[in-house]
Amino acid sequence: MKKPLSHVLGFLVLVILVVPVFIHAQEIAPDKTSLIVCNGTTAYPCTIDSLILLVHNAINFLIKLSTILAAAVFAFAGFKLLTSGGDEGAMKDAKKMLLMVLKGYVIVVLAWFLIYTITNALLDPAGGFSLLGNPSN
């Protein structure tokens, strides 16, 4: 029974890895919010500003990804807790999972806040060199 499921999952992973190659095969103007911020041509040269924008976009992407993953694991751990059926071991495992996800997500948010504070103190945000942007972004 697990064999067809593994084939389907393998196919989905292959599609997820291959489809973006064909979608981004054409030359398009880099977006300010994507991970491709320059393409090395004279129209969109790669400069130090592009590097800062790339780091900014990568950090924002990772924060959003960690938020989605934390929410999914919270939901899964809550489901495990609700369906434990009074089994102390299953309840303990679910509570441990909830606590570990909470600790991990708090660490991610605190690390973002620390980097945001340091870069705003060292770099001039008014000049467009804020590494993480505004918290409202």
Image (spheres, grey):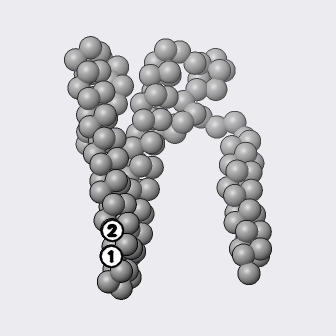
**Which residue is at the far bottom?**
85
- Image spot of residue 88 (x, y percent): 33, 76
Q: Measured along the vertical axis of the image, is residue 54 above or below residue 7?
A: above
Q: Residue at x 30, y 41 (%)?
A: 107
- Image spot of residue 62 (x, y percent): 45, 42
Residue that badge 2 annotates: 92
Res. 75 in view = no
Q: Quadrant of residue 5?
A: bottom right
Q: Residue at x 45, y 42 (%)?
A: 61
Which SS class for mark 1? helix
Q: Measured along the vertical axis of the image, is residue 21 above or below residue 69?
A: above
Q: Nearer the viewer, residue 52 or 75?
A: 75
Q: Residue at x 73, y 68 (%)?
A: 6
Label of residue 88 in the image = 1
Q: Quadrant of residue 11?
A: bottom right
Quadrant for the N terminus, please.
bottom right
Amino acid type at circle 2 is Lys
